[in-house]
Amino acid sequence: MSPEPRPARRVPLARHDTARRVTVTSPRTAAARRPRFPATREIDEQTHLGEVYMRSLLRTQFRLALFVCTVLGCVVCGLPLLFLAIPELREVDLLGIPFPWAVLAGLIYPAFVVGAWLYVRQAERNERHFADLVERP
Amino acid sequence: MSLIAVVVVVVAAVLIGAFGIRFSRTTSDFYVASRSVSPLWNASAIGGEYLSAASFLGVAGLILSYGADMLWLPVGWTGGYLVLLVLVSAPLRRSGAYTLPDFAEARLESMTVRRTASVLVVLIGWLYLMPQFQSAGLVLRTVTGAPVWVGGLLVAVVVAVNVLSGGMRSITFVQAFQYWLKLTALAVPLVFLLMAWHTDGRPAVSVADAVTWQVPLAGGKEYGLYSTYSLILATFLGTMGLPHVLVRFYTNPDGRAARRTTLVVLSLLGAFYLLPALYGWLGRMYAPDLVRTDAVVLTLPGRMIGGTLGDVLTALVTAGAFAAFLSTSSGLTVSVAGVIAQDLLKGGVRSFRAATLMAVAVPLVLALWARALPVADVVGLAFAVAASSFCPLLVLGIWWRRLSTTGALAGLFVGGGLASAAVLATITGGPYDGIAGALLAQPAAWTVPIAFAVMVSVSFLTPHRVPAGVARTMVRLHTPEDLDLDRGDWRPRSA
């Protein structure tokens, strides 16, 4: 449930002098859009802009989590089907160990750790991006 | 010699508990520790508390009995931490919640949801404690011939004394030590066992086993594919809902450290779970008569090596097994007793004492009277209940703003209720035949989707019951701590 709609914080200035033509030599768009308050205050006051910031953080982190879970789900749920669909695979030996045992009793554990490490790296990167975004002066 | 090992472990636990009282008041220890404990120590402590009798004895026993399909059990118990890492760990730490009921209250701003969560924590805790006591009886019978109830009673009393004196579990260092003790107690004998296997001419499993036992989904078990998937779902999603795991996350200084700790936990558990499969595999060749007994880890050193060395190694695994019972049971008892005292009794020291006795006595009686199911199976049922109640609560609570109080409550009741009913039916009357038996023995595959569906659909129907402070809670859960933001002023009442 989103809070009651509020008037946008920064209404564009009334352009009563649009009639006069000006040659734009240097479009200072960055300067024009610079917010008067840091984004952390937008979040604290739960303005629409603050909501947008929070939603973007949540969406990024959730997409990352969903991606990891999907890969994990495909591997984990795929393996029983794989063993069922290709019975020959069950008898294949990997370094003298039957393939299902080599995977389930060995290789899957380092794979978990690598996946977790990659996730942690990306999640921290996302948080740094968010911090840069909202703390930008 | 094994008896000496048991005595040493028990006496050590009691002494540490007795001395621990001087420098540990549960919460302040966590509070102080939160500034100084590195992810490795913290992760070792989580591992020490998590690796129970089911991991130490049960997995090898089930692999010996049922073969390759059971390899999924340790895979799920480890992989559960990967799911916990990506969906729950950092937001949970940032919530500041100390227990699962705390989280329920913080997120949903409702005492009713809090109390429902408390009841479920107690149920899951009891279900998890029961097999610990059962296996303690089994271990003591294997090494001394004592009746089965003696070991369970011994562990229950030691744990109760320990928890009442306020020591042991609260000391992160002790739990961390338990992990390394368990790893050593399983790894060192295994080295000697593999050497014995090597000098024996490296035999392989029998021809009959090579085409059935060693092969996943090779028939024999009815509804094998359903059971495998249900087991996977319960273990991967149930880990995040275990009461004694969550408390440890509070020891991390911030959400970022919570993630890193979980990463280390994954590595430690992965290292540990390489071992039980080898015990099961060796046991199939050297002790095939131990099918359905959970005793293979304890028996194998004596059978394959024998002599004094065999005795020493047996003593070592016995010590490891008792360490497993004591650490897991203590952690669970503290969590369960804390919740009973805080939410179901009046609170305070007196309630905590009464709650500790309740927390230990009920599963002990269950362990003595219920039929002896394989320990890892009963623990698997505890995971199924956790996966069908707390998993939806945590995942939806953390990621979905529109979760309403009514929706959460309905999901907890329906998911937790259905899973508990299936568990009760299995423990008291099972195993049943046919499809009903498979559905009841491994309920997660149907109870988890139902719980999620109920929580989501009821939330859609009751949009006016979405907590008022959800936006602030989301800021608290998801933003890094070093940002200067208003995160609300909620504090857990049990801390």
Image: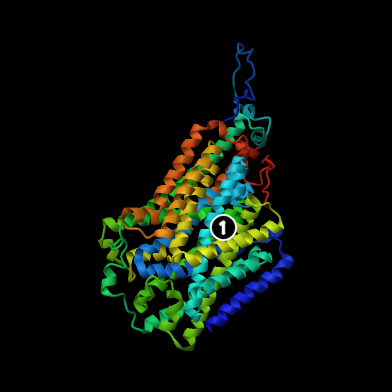
| Relative image position of residue B224 (x, y in whole percent) | 32, 58
The residue labelled by disc 1 is B245
Question: Residue sitting at 48 percent across and 48 percent down?
Answer: B417
Residue toward you, A34 or B272:
B272
Q: Name the outermost residue toward the top.
A: A19
Please, what is the three-letter code of the amino acid marked with disc 1?
Val
For this rendering, which residue is in front, B435 or A128? B435
Seen from the viewer's position, the closer of residues B31 and B35 is: B31
Seen at 61% across and 50% down, the residue is B93
Q: Position of residue A103 (x, y in %)?
A: 37, 63
Q: Is residue B237 above or below residue A11?
A: below
Look at the image and tell me whether residue A131 can be seen: no
B289 on left or right of B9: left
Instruction: Name above or below for residue B38 compared with residue B305.
Output: above
**Residue A93 makes an appearance in the image:** yes
Q: Which element carries disc 1, helix, strand or loop?
A: helix
Q: Quadrant of residue B110?
A: top right
Q: Callout 1: few (<14), some (14-19), or many (20+) C-alpha neighbours within 10 Å?
A: many
Where does the image place residue A95, in percent across and percent down from the top left? 34, 70
| Chain name for mark 1 | B
The picture places residue B238, in percent across and down from the top left corner, at 48, 54
Disc tally is 1
Q: Residue visible at 66% across and 41% down?
A: B487
In the displayed structure, B119 sits above or below B374; it is above
The picture quadrant where one finds residue B190 is bottom left
User: In the displayed image of the protein, which residue is found farthest to the right?
Assistant: B22
